[in-house]
Image (cartoon, rainbow, N blue to C red):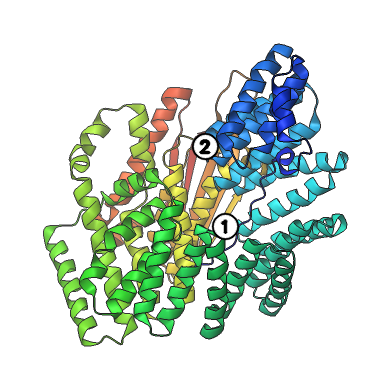
């Protein structure tokens, strides 16, 4: 089962977090003052007071103040106002607009050498990067802010920054590093007697303990946080801790204890009208009821969870709720009703990443060229599994397999119908040779057979009841799909992101081939700071696995190495050159071609042609040729590829 973590991102909008002593009525009078500076100060203070309660009114105050400040040419106030406008856009999830305002604030504060405001902007930009899952870049920005807070003796800011970096490491599943940062934050919050900061940090430390399998320590700390949150009347934190204790009890199969924790949490979230908390709590109450065999109650909780998830507009947990509804209804022999939720499940899984992801999923799946006969076979398999479910209702394995097949067929049918017109025109679109559209098609190089193989591997783990391995494989597969779908639409991506996708792909292939090969990805330190075309090397790595190391009777080895051949030396040069080598110890190209059937080499041939076309497009822009060189003998294959990079 995939790990769910509590990400408590600390939005470092520092000026807005602290109370204002002035009375609102007196400030309203000052808004009409004849003294322009008093008027601006009143507008800024009113804007900060209402930032988290009346956001629209707050924005009006800041924009009115901005006009007056620009007339006064008061740059420090102007920088502060731009920062606060960025905060408002961040609250509205308008990340591009927020970044625009933060950059304006940063430029002014840099000209003024206002290092504290610069640090706050670093922190705010880090929050945006974290929300976009660019965790490494977010951490870099927080680390730029940290020494400034230390220099300015902003102790509380330091604690909040350590806590924010810790939550980013939780998101990256590096729990030991996260724990180190939370310990630093804890020391500061203890020193400053910041109760909420200390309680939140202890909660995050408990989450790290849980994921590091230090369960007794996690439970002890959670019980302490539970008592502290009740004592200081941090009701929402109290409810969150109840859910964490409930989850641990659930994992330990102490369902009665888990039910007690979640029932108490449900009461707290209901009082607070916390829709997100209600969604999470109903979800786990549904899981508990399902484990206890009360499928009717489970179905009710899952449906309530789904209803609350839909109210939040954040669909990350809706697939779990929908899967719970489908499984519960199947147990209640309501297969017809269960099938009505399959399209919702597909839509929910698409929306986890966003509307663009759904579009890319359709493009990938449009390459699945199933004949009518194959579709009929799949339908017959579905019918057979439905009969198996009716005959042997107590066999959970059969139900899970039937649901998997139903989901796969539903996915293929829905995507194929909705993209029928697009598939008919795809060939003609490529022929138009418009660089922007052609680049998008060329980027989409993920082999559909790999998708099928991955799903089959997951299904095999489920059949073997190896839920841990299934969850691990599914998590890696989901991360790879997200990286591919995000990066394939871009002309250049940061080098670490592309290498991360390549590493994730090779991990999946390594698991699927039972660790029959090792691999290494090497690169110069300078490569970390460049941007390269996405997914260019993946087809060659795929070829090294499929036709190289998977066909030998010894431990396979794949080595991928990046090095910078030509650097960007001045402003006139826009592109540099990176050389990448992909080497394996397989049987060599000639033997592999003799062993493989020609129709199975179609994808590799298409991938090579598409890669050459992509490189030719870059040649048109940069004027440099980017060769692909193959060297092969009985001891393996070495492929050398040159590609452009930008800074």
Q: What residue sits 33% from the left and 82% below the top?
A: 396
Residue 558 image point, x, y percent: 51, 58
Residue 520: which numbered mark, if any?
Answer: 1
The C terminus - image quarter: top right
Q: Is 223 above or below relative to 585?
A: below
**Where residue 330 sits: x, y (%)?**
28, 76
Tell me the SS state at disc 2.
loop
Q: Residue at x 70, y 43 (%)?
A: 12
Task: Name the residue beneath numbered marker 2.
Answer: 94
Task: Give whichever of 618, 490 is nearer the camera.
Answer: 490
**Residue at the top extreme, as displayed:** 71
What crowding class fits label 1: few (fewer than 14 Cα within 10 Å), some (14-19), or many (20 or more)?
Answer: few
Q: Is residue 614 left or right of residue 180?
A: left
Q: Which residue is drawn at 43% across and 82% down?
A: 291
- Residue 630 drawn above or below residue 381: above
Counting residues from the N terminus, which is met first, the one under dot 2 or under dot 1? Answer: 2
Q: Nearer the viewer, residue 101 or 444?
A: 101
Image position, residue 178 (x, y; %): 70, 59
Compare residues 32 and 179 and report the one nearer the observer: 32
Query: Residue 565 — which label?
Result: none
Q: Can residue 464 be seen in this view?
A: yes
Q: Residue at x 77, y 15 (%)?
A: 35
Position of residue 119 in the picture relative to residue 99 (left or right): right
Q: How crowded is mark 2: few (under 14 residues within 10 Å), some or many (20 or more)?
A: some
Give how far apart the Cα atoms at labels 2 and 1 are.
39 Å
**Residue 371 found in image quarter:** bottom left
602 versus 293 height, above or below:
above
For residue 633, say whether it is visible: no
Q: Nearer the viewer, mark 2 or mark 1?
A: 2
Residue 128 falls in which quadrant of the image? top right
Element on which disc 1 rests: strand
Q: Tell me residue 611's x, y (percent).
A: 38, 40
């Amino acid at each position: 089962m995939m790990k769910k973590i509590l990400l408590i991102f600390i939005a470092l909008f520092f000026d807005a977090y602290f109370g204002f002593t002035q009375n609102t009525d007196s400030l309203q009078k000052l808004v009409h003052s004849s003294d322009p500076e008093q008027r601006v100060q009143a507008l800024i203070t009113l804007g900060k007071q209402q930032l988290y309660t009346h956001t629209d009114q707050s924005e009006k105050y800041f924009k009115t103040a901005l006009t007056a400040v620009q007339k006064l040419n008061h740059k420090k106030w102007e920088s502060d106002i731009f920062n606060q406008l960025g905060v408002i856009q961040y609250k509205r999830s308008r990340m591009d607009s927020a970044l625009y305002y933060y950059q304006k604030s940063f430029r002014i504060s840099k000209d003024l050498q206002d290092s504290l405001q610069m640090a706050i902007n670093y922190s705010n930009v880090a929050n945006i990067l974290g929300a976009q899952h660019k965790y490494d870049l977010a951490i870099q920005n927080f680390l730029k802010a940290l020494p400034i807070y230390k220099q300015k003796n902003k102790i509380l800011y330091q604690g909040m920054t350590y806590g924010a970096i810790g939550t980013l490491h939780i998101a990256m599943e590096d729990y030991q590093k996260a724990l180190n940062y939370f310990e630093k934050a804890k020391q500061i919050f203890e020193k400053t007697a910041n109760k909420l900061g200390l309680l939140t940090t202890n909660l995050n430390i408990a989450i790290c303990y849980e994921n590091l399998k230090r369960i007794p320590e996690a439970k002890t700390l959670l019980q302490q946080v539970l008592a502290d949150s009740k004592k200081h009347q941090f009701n929402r934190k109290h409810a969150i801790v109840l859910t964490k204790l409930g989850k641990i009890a659930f994992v330990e199969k102490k369902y009665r204890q888990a039910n007690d924790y979640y029932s108490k949490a449900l009461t707290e979230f209901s009082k607070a009208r916390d829709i997100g908390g209600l969604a999470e709590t109903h979800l786990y109450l549904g899981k508990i009821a399902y484990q206890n065999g009360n499928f009717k109650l489970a179905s009710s909780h899952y449906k309530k969870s789904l209803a609350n998830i839909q109210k939040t507009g954040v669909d990350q947990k809706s697939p779990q709720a929908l899967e719970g509804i489908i499984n519960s209804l199947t147990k209640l022999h309501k297969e017809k009703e269960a099938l009505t939720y399959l399209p919702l499940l597909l839509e929910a899984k698409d929306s986890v990443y966003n509307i663009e992801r759904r579009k890319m999923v359709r493009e990938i799946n449009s390459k699945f060229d199933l004949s009518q006969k194959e579709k009929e076979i799949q339908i017959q398999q579905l019918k057979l599994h439905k009969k198996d479910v009716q005959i042997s209702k107590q066999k959970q394995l059969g139900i899970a397999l039937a649901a998997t097949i139903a989901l796969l067929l539903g996915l293929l049918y829905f995507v194929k119908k909705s993209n029928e017109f697009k598939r008919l025109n795809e060939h003609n679109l490529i022929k138009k040779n418009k660089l922007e559209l052609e680049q998008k098609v060329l980027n989409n190089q993920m082999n559909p057979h790999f998708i099928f193989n991955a799903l089959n591997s997951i299904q095999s783990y489920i059949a073997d009841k190896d839920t841990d391995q299934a969850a691990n494989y599914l998590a890696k597969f989901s991360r790879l799909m997200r990286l591919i779908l995000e990066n394939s639409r871009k002309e250049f991506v940061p080098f670490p992101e592309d290498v991360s996708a390549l590493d994730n792909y090779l991990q999946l292939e390594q698991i699927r081939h039972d660790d029959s090969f090792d691999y290494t990805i090497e690169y110069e330190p300078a490569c970390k700071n460049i941007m390269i075309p996405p997914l260019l090397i993946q087809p060659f790595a795929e070829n090294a696995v499929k036709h190289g190391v998977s066909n030998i009777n010894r431990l396979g080895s794949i080595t991928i190495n990046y090095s910078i051949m030509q650097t960007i030396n001045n402003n006139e040069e826009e592109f540099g050159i990176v050389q990448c080598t992909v080497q394996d110890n397989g049987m060599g190209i000639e033997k592999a071609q003799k062993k493989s059937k020609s129709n199975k080499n179609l994808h590799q041939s298409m991938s090579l042609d598409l890669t050459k076309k992509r490189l030719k497009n870059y040649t048109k822009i940069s004027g440099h040729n980017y060769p692909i060189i193959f060297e092969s003998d009985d001891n393996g294959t070495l492929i050398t590829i040159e590609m452009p990079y930008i800074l």
